[in-house]
Image (cartoon, grey):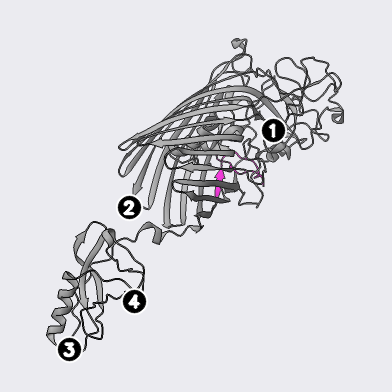
Amino acid sequence: MSKAKLILAVVALFFFPMPTFAQDAYLPNGFNRVDKTQSEPPQWKFPLLSAGDFPARFTSVAYKTPGIDWANFNIAGIAGLSQVQTPEPAPATPPAASTSSALTWHGITLYGAYDVGVGWVSHGLPQSPYNYEGSSLVNRNANGSRWLVEPNNLSQTGLGVRGNVEFAHGWSVVFNALTGINPQSGQLANASLTDIKDNGLPRASYSEAIDGARAGQPLNDEYYGGISSRDFGTLTFGRQRALGTDTMLLYDPVAGGYAFSYIGYNGTMAAGGDTEDTRWDDAVKYRIAHGPVHFGTMYKFTDGSGGCYSASATWTATTCTPVEPRNNAWGFNLGGEIRKLSTDLVYQHYNEAISVLNPLIGPAGPMQDSYQSTTDSINTNPITGPNPVPADNNLISTDNTVYGIVTDNNAIMAAARYAWDPFRFYAGYEYIWQNNPANPLGVGATDQGGYLMSGVEDNNLDAQKLLNIWWEGIKYTYRTKTDITLSWYEQRQNDFRRNPSTCSPGSMRSSCAGTLDEGSLYLDHRFIQHFDGFAGLAYSFVTGGLAIAIPHGPGVPYLHNSNFAPTIGGRFTF
């Protein structure tokens, strides 16, 4: 081919109307773009050339316009002419969409985690197949040291499906369905069964028992749906995390990991008083963000059964009055970001909040274990019916049921986070005030997961109970893949007895002032995108009224008031 034809091809490229690609690809202002993911680049056609069109290829080199990749022309495939090519620079980082390995189809994503480890505890109990929080925190019934399989150390093992599907410009349908599973047993996470399985057993035979919002529901974390707008925010309804739980996950240096975080293991802070309220059923939540400021509000409708209640010390099934539940709740959240500083403020109120404590005496229960009281801690009204011996005379059987304390709770929380690479700093404070419920629940009321309460205490508090919870922590990131996190948590309660003089050594009650502290240090290394390994330790201890295991006279203390718990394990996420 002559040099004249080659010159004509280049002139035509710059001075005549832009030709079209043989495939769809677009740049701003109508420019066509080479799709670099194709094995063969598309061809430009120049109508002024003679028969036998000349292909042109585009590679990245030296010219940059907004929205257009670096470009250079290479003429190839022309007889008698060697190809001229300028070397390409190293490829840039691919866009996030091309590297994402999320299992997403049409806006619907399957996701989950598997987290398991091995730990040693200085004072522990046999692991329950239903326990999802592990054994790192000091436990009221824990005794000797032991090695344990520890579940869900940094994340709750589970499986979920979430969706965000646009149905109109700027409007989407959103939903989330997520459940927690125990990696050590394959059982659904179920705090209630950890207590129920100990019903009727002596204290020395207990396994690890906890309290929490996950109670064996098929979808025990969240299950909600709603509508989201780019301009007007997101409105959802269903079983959802409380605003305090959302905030805890953002401002806890451990992000709620059970093995190394008190406020993750025990939901008192996240729930605003009682750990069962970290998730709200029948709840509507609204969130909106404008610039650096975001706002949220949440309301829980009344649900379940209120059971049967009587203030009489000689009540029976015929004199017990059915009551309607009034367990509604509400909350607000306001927060913002200023450069590298993030802050949030949360208020929550919950009526008829339930805290499940120790196992009940069942039909096979050794009645000599008098510390498992079957009477109310304040006025000694029977909580299991007028004739607790034999136990089958109970109004509600103690088989497959729970026992708990009922309060009305208020809480206000402030939290902050600051990034100063490679460090991140965390701090927070919450003030909680609890009172006996204005509307008492009765025996037979429903708890999390639909379990019935065969023991109910509506007047457990002598006076208003006050809790102060604060935490602080620092996270250091080494070469992007390794995090080292140091944290400290403390909870303090006031003396809410009518007669404070009883709060002395040898006569302590759970209503006496006390503290719970936990410190932790751990390292987390990301080997690959979806797998990380961790190792660390936690130390926790209790004092005063918080070192009393049973909330009844004569005040039975913890078997051991401290626990040291090193843990090592791995986590896979997708």
Within the magenta stretch, is there residue 135? yes
Instruction: Point out residue 286 in the picture as x, y percentages from the top left corner.
Output: 50, 35
Category of crowding for the residue at label 4, using alpha-carbon neighbours closer than 10 angstroms: few (below 14), some (14–19), many (at least 20)? few
As measured in the structure, the alpha-carbon distance from the residue carrying label 2 to the one carrying label 3 is 56 Å
**Which label is found at residue 40?**
4
Which residue range is magenta in the image? Answer: 118-139
Q: Quadrant of residue 393?
A: top right
Q: Does the magenta portion include 304?
A: no
Q: Is residue 43 above or below residue 107?
A: below
Residue at position x 79%, y 14% in the image: 312
Distance, label 4 to label 3, CA atoms, is: 24 Å
C-alpha distance separating marks 1 and 4:
63 Å
Q: CA distance from mark 1 to mark 3?
A: 87 Å
Main SS of the magenta segment? loop
Please tell me whether mark 4 or mark 2 is closer to you in this view: 4
Where does residue 201 sit, x and y in percent of width and height? Answer: 76, 36
Helix, strand or loop for disc 1: loop
The amino acid beneath tag 1 is Asp
| Residue drawn at point x = 49 percent, y = 39 percent | 234
Mark 1, residue position: 447
Circle 1 residues within 10 Å: few <14, some 14–19, many ≥20 = many
Residue at (34, 49) in percent of width and height: 478
User: Does any portion of residue 138 appear in the rendered image?
Assistant: no
Q: Which mark is residue 479?
A: 2
Upstream in sequence: badge 2 or badge 3: 3
N-term mark: 4 or 3? 3
